[in-house]
Image (tube, grey):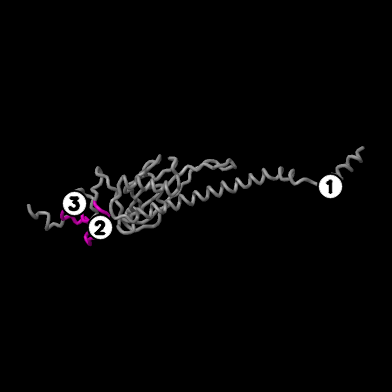
């Protein structure tokens, strides 16, 4: 009896007959799963690339500004980022920050920061954490840091969980030494280098004797010969 059983097993092993339908039913689920895995991971990498390119667009756009940017400008930059990444469900965030390097103290200082979405504006402590990722800069040089976040939800559950796509870039101002944020309560609203400040102030970044323009009315930047003029 045992010999007959072995004979049957040997005959089954050597039998090459089969049905394509049955073989396809066995293999097809595995093929579909592999296709799903490839598509999901490809889409995740594609969306990361799209977010990074959109980030570069925002940074390049702001780097070309010579007028102060304001709240509507940041709002529209956020809308543009959502259009470029095709994110319209409120799952994206944008933060734009301008920092200045102090070579004397060898540190980056926060100039201004604006955020849209659920992220908070960058603080001085955040700048300190970000500093190791910034390039070498000269004294009083400024950088525009653009950060974006997007919640990514895979279309299929194939081992990749939900995660946040984070991208950042830093860009130097191109046509002016700085990019100002216009806030009537905190900023005098002077231009980034193309406009003269009010009155006889020397607060013009394109002038040879330009100053830091830290005073609100520009009085300390007026030439001594003009301070008493008209008094």
Judged left or right of residue 225, residue 163 is right
Q: Residue at x 41, y 43 (%)?
A: 93
Query: Which quadrant would residue 178 be assigned to in this image?
Result: bottom left
* Residue that carries the numbered disc 2 in the rendered image: 194
Judged left or right of residue 215, residue 180 is right
Give the structural element (helix, strand or loop) at label 3.
loop
Q: How many numbered dots are placed on residues in this image? A: 3
Confirm whether the magenta stretch covers residue 204.
yes
Q: Give the residues in magenta.
A: 190-209
User: What secondary structure do most residues of the magenta stretch adopt?
Assistant: loop
Give the structural element (helix, strand or loop) at label 2.
loop
**2 or 1: tag closer to the N-terminus:** 1
Question: Residue 223's x, y, as percent?
Answer: 15, 57
- Which residue reaches farthest left? 231
Question: Residue 188's x, y, as percent?
Answer: 23, 48
* Residue that carries the numbered disc 1 in the rendered image: 15
Question: Residue 153's x, y, as percent?
Answer: 52, 41
Judged left or right of residue 53, residue 38 is right
**In-front residue for pair 2/134:** 2
Mark-to-mark CA distance, 3 and 1: 97 Å
**In-front residue for pair 175/83:** 83
* Residue that carries the numbered disc 3 in the rendered image: 218
Question: Residue 213's x, y, as percent?
Answer: 23, 52
**3 or 2: tag closer to the N-terminus:** 2
């Amino acid at each position: 009896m045992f010999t007959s059983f072995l004979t049957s097993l040997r005959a089954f092993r050597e039998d090459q007959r089969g049905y394509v339908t049955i073989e396809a039913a066995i293999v097809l689920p595995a093929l579909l799963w592999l296709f799903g895995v490839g598509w999901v991971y490809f889409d995740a990498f594609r969306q990361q690339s799209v977010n990074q390119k959109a980030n570069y667009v925002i940074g390049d756009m702001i780097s070309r500004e010579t007028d102060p940017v304001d709240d509507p400008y940041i709002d529209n930059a956020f809308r543009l980022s959502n259009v470029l990444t095709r994110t319209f469900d409120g799952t994206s965030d944008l933060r734009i920050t301008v920092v200045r390097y102090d070579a004397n103290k060898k540190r980056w200082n926060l100039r201004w920061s604006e955020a849209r979405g659920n992220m908070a504006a960058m603080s001085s402590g955040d700048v300190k954490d970000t500093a190791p990722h910034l390039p070498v800069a000269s004294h009083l040089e400024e950088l525009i840091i653009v950060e974006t976040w997007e919640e990514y939800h895979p279309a299929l559950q194939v081992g990749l969980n939900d995660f946040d796509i984070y991208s950042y870039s830093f860009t130097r101002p191109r046509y002016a030494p700085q990019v100002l944020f216009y806030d009537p309560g905190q900023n005098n609203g002077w231009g980034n280098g193309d406009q003269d400040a009010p009155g006889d102030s020397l607060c013009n970044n394109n002038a040879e004797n330009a100053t830091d323009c830290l005073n609100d009315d520009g009085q300390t930047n007026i030439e001594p010969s003009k301070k008493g003029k008209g008094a």
